Amino acid sequence: MTTRRTKGARRLRDAVDVCLAAVGMAALAAPTAGAAPRGTGPCPGGSPADVTCTGGELADGTPYRFVVPDRWNGVVIVDLDFASRLAEEPLTAEPTGRGYAVGGTTRDVTGWRIAEAIDNQAAALGRFEEAVGRPRWAVASGRSMGGFVSAGVAQVHPGVFDAAVPFCGGLGGSVGQWNQKLDTVFTLKNLLFAGSTLPVTEIPADTERATSAWRSALASAQQTPAGRARIALAAAIGQLPGWGLDAGGAATPMPDPGDADAVQEGMYLALAGGSQPYIGQAMSSRRSIEALAGGNPSWNTGIDYARQFASASPEQRRTVRELYARAGLDLRADLGILSRAPRIGADPAAVAYLERGIVFDGDLAVPVLTVNPIGDQISTVAQQQSYQEAARAAGKAALLRQSYLRTVGHCGFTTGEQVAAITAMTERLRTGHWSGSATPDGLNRLARRAGQTPGRYVHYRPPVFNRPYVG
């Protein structure tokens, strides 16, 4: 089994795969009927009709499960979180109704042990092949950590999987994305809460209490002109969206880029609003990572926050400057405070731990289609740019397509929008090249067919990621 995490050659498929890849699109759209795939059995209650299932546990105790339609088109989608979903979820019914086998594992055992989670996807696919047979194409996919892991699968196991469709994954890589989160929280702490016990690293075990304390402090700061200005600066440095979910988790209107108050409110909501705020993940996930890594894997030694602010989006820079002027604050003075603030160093062993999980080197050997909301507060769009740049630098940009949706929140997709991306990747595998299906217009057409509602794919250029890490 291929185990590359940074460099290595792809294992070629044998002649059987070459023959299978020549099968036409008609077989994908309407597979011939036949007996149920061998080695499968009854499915959980609520599963779609005309399917059979297979499942069990991997060597580390991670559950896996696959649902296979009787009229299987030969494509299997392998997802980090599939085995923890309810059988009746649309993301099971819609793809299987279109002929796809779907399945995968759970994150419950591996958590932030990303290397093990990546290898588990290959192990689960192996169990599927033993029970059902070798697929025509195997596609790694998933949302959030599942998207992160599926991009890792494409890099580590290109001889096992044929493609990947990562949804809303943190594609700045483990080290890069946690350095960026450190920047955001460090800025908030030093400009707003310097005398407090609010944690930045070394997160205490009671992460709910830490998150609650941070949200309460941010809510108080949001009530003052100075607090709003400094929250905006921290969000701009951390490349958060200026768009968020309200306290009840509902989407707010996309703000006018020229409305400083609306953009700042969006920044604040990205940090502390909704049920999955940025600051909450900065506490809970960092605590998990620090425990696994045996220390702090993030640093800001040598980081120039004035330069990071200068590279923020134009609308965010305008927002910060306007709010600082209104509050009677000196932006240059605050950037000076940040430049003089004692830096945080990383534990080298903890950094090495995250590196072993995955460093995205861009050396793609299979096609990858990434999908991300432009208003995602957890997997920020700048991280997608980092992945794109790595592929370009490695000379593999032709294998990558990236797509963005005009929506807010972490992984806020419709079922149709997700099916559209899988369908576009299937077309890429069938033809050997990217077609109009992978464009915003093409994806929106596919989403409409799959979900009966218009897709929200848009043309979008993300900002340059300010904390790239390539090892």
Image (spheres, rainbow, N blue to C red):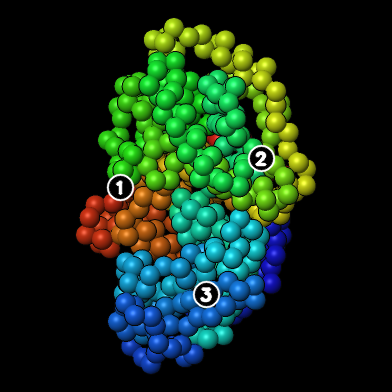
Answer whether labels 1 and 3 touch (C-beta < 8 Å): no
Report the amino acid beneath label 1.
Arg
Residue in the image at 45% along x and 20% along y: 227
**Disc 2 and disc 3: Cα gap in Å?**
33 Å
Mark before the other along the chain sequence, 1 or 2: 2
Res 202 label? 2
Mark toward the viewer: 1 or 3: 3
Q: Position of residue 52 (x, y in %)?
A: 40, 85
Side of 297 where 461 appears, left or right:
left
Mark before the other along the chain sequence, 2 or 3: 3
Image quarter hosting the C terminus:
top right
Mark toward the viewer: 2 or 3: 2
Which SS class for mark 1? loop
Answer whether labels 2 and 3 touch (C-beta < 8 Å): no
**Disc 1 and disc 2: Cα gap in Å?**
39 Å
- Give the quadrant of residue 7: bottom right
Which SS class for mark 2? loop
Q: Position of residue 413 (x, y in %)?
A: 35, 53
Residue in the image at 35% along x and 20% along y: 260
- Give the quadrant of residue 23: bottom left
Judging by the rendered image, the residue that carries numbered circle 3 is 64
Report the amino acid beneath label 2.
Glu
Q: Nearer the viewer, residue 270 or 390?
A: 270
**Disc 1 and disc 3: Cα gap in Å?**
32 Å
Judging by the rendered image, the residue that carries numbered circle 1 is 456
Mark before the other along the chain sequence, 1 or 3: 3
Side of 211 where 269 appears, left or right:
left
- Give the quadrant of residue 225: top left
Which SS class for mark 3? strand
